[in-house]
Amino acid sequence: MDGYAGKVLRINLDTDKIIKEPLSKKMCEEFIGGRGFVAKTLYKELPPDSDPLGKDNLFIIATGPLSGHFLPASGKTHFGSKSPATGGYADSNMGGHFGPALKYAGFDMAVITGKAKTPSYLYIKNDIIEIRDAKTYWGKGSLTCEEMMKKDLGEDFQILTIGPAGEKLVKFACISHDFGRQAGRTGIGAVLGSKNIKAIAVKGTGSIPVFDLKKAYAKGKQAFKKVAEKPGFKGWTPEGTAGITDWVNEVGSFPAKNFQTSHIDHSHMINGKKVLERLKITDKACYCCPTPCGKYGKTKTTLGTAYMEGPEFETISLFGGSCMLESIEEIAYANYLCDELGIDTISGASVAAFAIECYEKGLITKEEIGKEIKFGDFDSIVYLLDLMSLRKNALGDLLSQGVKIASEKIKKGSEKFAIHVKGLEWTGYECRNAPSMMLAYMTADVGAHHNRAWVLGHDVVGADTNVHDLIVAGAKSDRRPKAVIHYEDSAGYVIESQHLRPAFDLLGCCRLQMMELGFEVENYAELYGVITGRKIIWDDIIKISEKVWNLTRVIWAREIKGFGRKFDYPPARFYEETTPSGPNRGYYIQKEELDELLDAYYAQRGWDQNGIPTQGTLDAIGLSV
């Protein structure tokens, strides 16, 4: 099939059986690739009620039809499983170079089941597939392991690794690649650790068939030119995602002290400019990307010196705001430590902030922790990251489960400020005066995550515009007016975004060129057509994205007894406590308003009042389950 490598790799670690089977043409037509392959495979093959950290859980790697081709930012790789963090549907993606290498080796997707008898890694070199001993690498940090393996196997291998946190089954463990790219969310690294797999190394030297090679090359070349001509190209690239730090703070959506408030006084000390001035060595891009948003740099702190990629905005907002670190060097070191230990920086920072608030409120003691901890203290944050990642002492073991489970054990009102949805920690935007963004977090299909629908700009300025334009326009104000909630409008806008942004996860390319720079979606439909030979329009891709969104909800309902509306609520802090300071002081969203938002959202999706897709809706979108 044009555009695809054409094969699925299946590895059963219980039996050491390795199967190479043809990729289904029907699967490609109905689910395109990437996230679509993940959702369909999980629904079809995951045994119901499987333990996320048990042998029966699947670990899926999936690419898309645009992965590995000559077009802007075509290096995305998608991972899927049942989540250790939430117990529900899980996927996570990363940039870098792994996905294209897997396709050049001949595989669009890999499905791994069972558990290796001893610590192992997977070796894939074109048609050679081996399960190899990993005792030399076990216990090593993610970055250290990748460096060791490149020396052992060769620099031209693309390598995924987990750190000690993944080995110890920390529920927010991540997968690392290319010394700074992570599949960070949903605990996907713990799933790999539960299978006794330390790493996956791939080298591919094959090619991918293309329907019209001459036209695909011309269209790809034209796409690079168009991206470079976009107004935001020069404005976005230098600072990358860190460039929005000041803007988010100015509009009162920057999380501070475990989301107690939404504004800090030190954003100018931890913004994108400080990344460039104090950290950056060079720009760093993913496969075939003309907009290198990654910043590879060096940081020096009281605890040592480190080289790392980043920090990205989410890491800055959670460590710099929720944990209140005021130095970009300290945030960068925390970033490095998370990467080496193998934990998601978002969840890691969120768990640390939750623990500090619990300590301040007297809900956990110094004796339980092992030392005094406080917001803004670098030593406290590093200590907590080490504690949770290595599951040291009883509290470290508890924190390794994430804020939801930790709060259920600690109790004493801590559930109200355990900042998560469905067990996944909240990312870097405080939303008590941002109803559409609040709804996006509530209904994201992996738990609280901004990458499914970033609609903060809609709440702030009421306009459909890109991030770069918002930053240039600025939003300096002592107090932002309370956002007026138009339930149907918010629901419709969120749903539209939830179909648009994940569509790129089907195709296997980065959304930045479209979402931040304004590279038109019609270009992707054209590129898909000349590469695969299938003539479709962008609306056809969006319809498949909608089908996948509904399928992931069906998976949640199947896997979690009693799943429904109550799982979509945010923590009580957001509807019981007013924002105490900053541009949004005095504001919050009432519980009744949250229900109105959910009512409108469920109605427009064709779900029942408990948030479950009706059979009529599933039939209408071509999803028979």
Image (cartoon, rainbow, N blue to C red):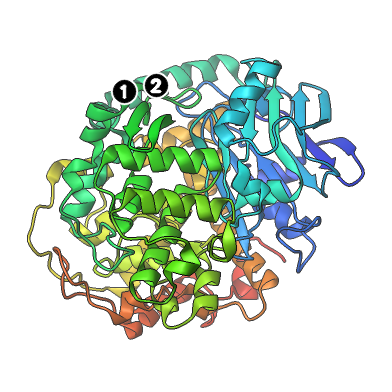
Tell me residue 470's x, y (percent): 20, 46
Observer-nearest residue: 195 or 87? 195
Question: In this rendering, is residue 450 above or below 515?
Answer: below
- Which residue extends farthest bottom? 592
Side (left or right) of 485 relative to 475: right
**Which sits in the foreground, 150 or 36?**
150
Image quarter (top left, top right, bottom left or bottom right) of the N terminus: top right
Where is residue 528, by image quadrant? top right
Q: Quadrant of residue 333?
A: top left
Residue 289 in percent (x, y) is at: 44, 25
Give the class, few, some or many, for how many residues have Cα within 10 Å of label 2's Cα (few <14, many ≥20).
some
Q: Badge 1: few (under 14), some or many (20 or more) residues near its Cα, within 10 Å?
A: some
Query: Front-most of 225 and 56?
Result: 56
Badge 1 marks a residue whose secondary structure is helix
At 22% from the left edge and 27% from the top edge, which residue is drawn?
A: 277
Seen in the image, is 168 located left or right of residue 465?
right
Q: Amino acid at mark 1?
A: Ala
* Residue found farthest to the left: 478
- The amino acid beneath tag 2 is Phe
Q: Which residue is mark 2?
A: 224
**What number is the disc on residue 228?**
1
In contact (CB < 8 Å): disc 2 and disc 1: yes
Looking at the picture, does residue 308 appear above or below residue 443? above
Q: Position of residue 123 (x, y in %)?
A: 76, 27
Cα–Cα span, label 2 and label 1: 6 Å
- In the rendered image, is residue 376 in sight? yes
**Which mark is on residue 271?**
none
Question: What secondary structure is found at the residue carrying circle 2?
Answer: helix
Res 466 quadrant in image: top left
Query: Which residue lies at the image location 61% right of the left edge and 76% below the top edge?
Result: 614
